[in-house]
């Protein structure tokens, strides 16, 4: 620079998750926005899990001819009289049709209770849709 003149530079905006904010803006405001986005994602994920659980219970109902309200996340084969080895295969088939997924042997072995069934189905549905739910 000529004559030792200094150049004043404008601060660059911060970019975070597709939003820009001027540098020096209130961090509590940014924190609030991020907390709201996190809450929205968590609520959406919970809604998706609730919808998934409803479909899993419907698969139990159609496979074992039971009231879906009797199925909880803690239900195991001990809680459903017809949930034996053949019932497990029939349940898996019903779940595959309900969710449009396919299970491999490892998936079938992992599905030892309703909570694990939901976990396996969730991972499969996420892969089918190309997103993690």
Image (spheres, helix red, strand yellow):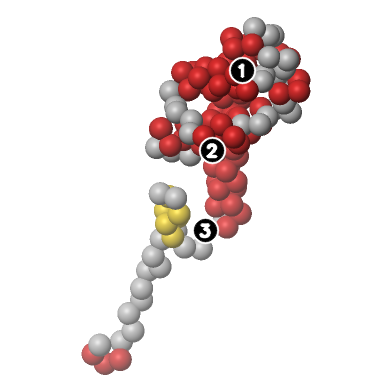
First of labels 3, 2 by sequence position: 3
Using the numbered discs, state the Cα–Cα distance from disc 3 to disc 2 in whole angstroms. Answer: 51 Å
Using the numbered discs, state the Cα–Cα distance from disc 2 to disc 1 in whole angstroms. Answer: 17 Å
Identify the residue shown where x is 46% and y is 18%: 97
Write down the quadrant of residue 100 in the picture. Answer: top left
Q: Which residue is mark 1?
A: 87
Q: Which residue is mark 3?
A: 25
Element carrying mark 3: loop
What x and y, as percent, mark residue 122? Answer: 53, 33
Q: Are marks 3 and 2 in contact (CB under 8 Å)?
A: no
Write down the quadrant of residue 116 in the picture. Answer: top right
What x and y, as percent, mark residue 13? Answer: 41, 61
First of labels 3, 1 by sequence position: 3
Element carrying mark 2: helix
What x and y, as percent, mark residue 14? Answer: 44, 60
Closer to us: 38 or 57:
57
Element carrying mark 1: helix
In the picture, measured across the screen, residue 43 lies left or right of residue 10, that is right
Can the viewer see residue 40? no
Identify the residue shown where x is 55% and y is 17%: 90
Question: Which mark, by number, is residue 128?
Answer: none
What x and y, as percent, mark residue 127? Answer: 43, 37
Q: Which residue is mark 2?
A: 106
The local crowd at label 1, few if under 14, some if 14 to 19, many if 20 or more residues have their Cα within 10 Å, is: some
């Amino acid at each position: 620079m000529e004559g030792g003149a200094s150049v004043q530079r404008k601060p660059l905006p911060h970019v975070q998750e597709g939003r820009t904010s001027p540098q020096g803006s209130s961090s509590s405001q940014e924190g609030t926005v991020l907390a709201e986005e996190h809450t929205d994602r968590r609520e959406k994920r919970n809604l998706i899990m609730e919808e998934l659980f409803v479909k899993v219970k419907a698969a139990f109902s159609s496979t074992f001819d039971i009231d879906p309200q009797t199925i909880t996340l803690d239900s195991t084969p001990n809680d459903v009289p017809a949930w034996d080895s053949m019932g497990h295969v029939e349940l898996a088939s019903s779940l595959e049709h309900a969710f449009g997924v396919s299970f491999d042997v490892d998936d079938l072995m992992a599905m030892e209770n309703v909570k694990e069934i939901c976990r396996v189905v969730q991972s499969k549905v996420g892969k089918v849709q190309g997103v993690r739910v």
